[in-house]
Image (tube, rainbow, N blue to C red):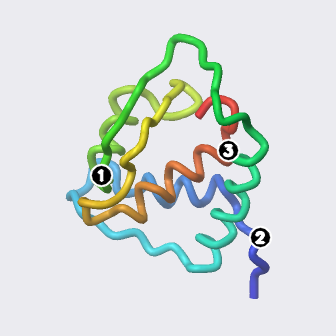
């Protein structure tokens, strides 16, 4: 059994972007242990950074994803996947959409992989 800290963020990102170009709403299976490890790891990144971020242009500012995973993937497809493009997400990542877990998983994985640029 994997410990909570053992997972590969690159494999997780790859799994999360697999639905790109497919029929919207495709579910992604991510084991609970991987999600727990991701949350624990990204928590450390957030706690190590200041609450007030200093950002530099060029930067894509995004808000109100509301769990719309297909829209998030489309934004990355058109705007460039990290680290090709820098993003600032303002909030409202989850709630109304059917794929809130997929949204926050991919955002957390990118934050873990690129803590200074995402």
Q: Quick check: marks 1 and 2 in contact, CB under 8 Å?
A: no
> Residue 105 appears at what percent x and percent y?
51, 59
Q: Residues within 10 Å of mark 1 (few under 14, many from 20)?
A: some
In what element is the residue under mark 2? loop
Check the picture and name the quadrant holding the C terminus: top right
**Disc 2 residue crowd, few under 14, some 14–19, many 20+, Cα 10 Å:** few
The x, y position of residue 87, in whole percent, is 49, 29
Which of marks 2 and 1 precedes in the sequence? Answer: 2
Return the residue found at the far top: 57
Residue drawn 30% across the image and 39% down it: 74
Q: Decide which of tag 3 and tag 2 comes sooner along the chain.
A: 2
Question: Measuring 49% from the left and 30% from the top, which residue is drawn there?
Answer: 88
Pointers 3 and 1 in contact (CB under 8 A)?
no
Q: Which mark is residue 6?
A: 2
Counting other residues with Cα less than 10 Å from the Cα at mark 3, is it few (<14), some (14-19), or many (20 or more)? some
- Report which quarter residue 23 is drawn in: bottom left
* Residue on which the image places disc 1: 66
Residue at 31 percent across and 60 percent down: it is: 95
Using the rendered view, name the quadrant where residue 11 is placed: bottom right
State the separation of the CA atoms marked 1 and 2.
Answer: 29 Å
**Label located before the other in sequence (3 or 1):** 1
The answer to whether residue 117 is left or right of residue 60 is right
Give the residue number, with chain letter if any, for mark 3. Answer: 113
**Which is in the foreground here, disc 3 or disc 1?**
1
Q: Residue at left 79%, top 79%?
A: 3
């Amino acid at each position: 059994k994997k410990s909570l800290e053992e997972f590969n963020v690159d494999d997780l990102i790859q799994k999360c972007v697999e639905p790109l170009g497919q029929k919207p709403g495709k579910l992604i299976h991510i084991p609970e242990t991987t999600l727990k490890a991701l949350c624990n790891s990204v928590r450390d990144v957030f706690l190590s950074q200041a609450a007030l971020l200093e950002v530099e242009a060029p930067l894509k500012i995004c808000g109100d994803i509301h769990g719309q995973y297909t829209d998030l993937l489309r934004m990355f497809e058109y705007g460039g996947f990290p680290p090709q493009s820098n993003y600032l997400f303002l909030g409202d990542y989850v709630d109304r959409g059917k794929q809130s877990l997929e949204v926050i998983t991919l955002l957390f994985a990118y934050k873990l992989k690129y803590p200074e640029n995402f």
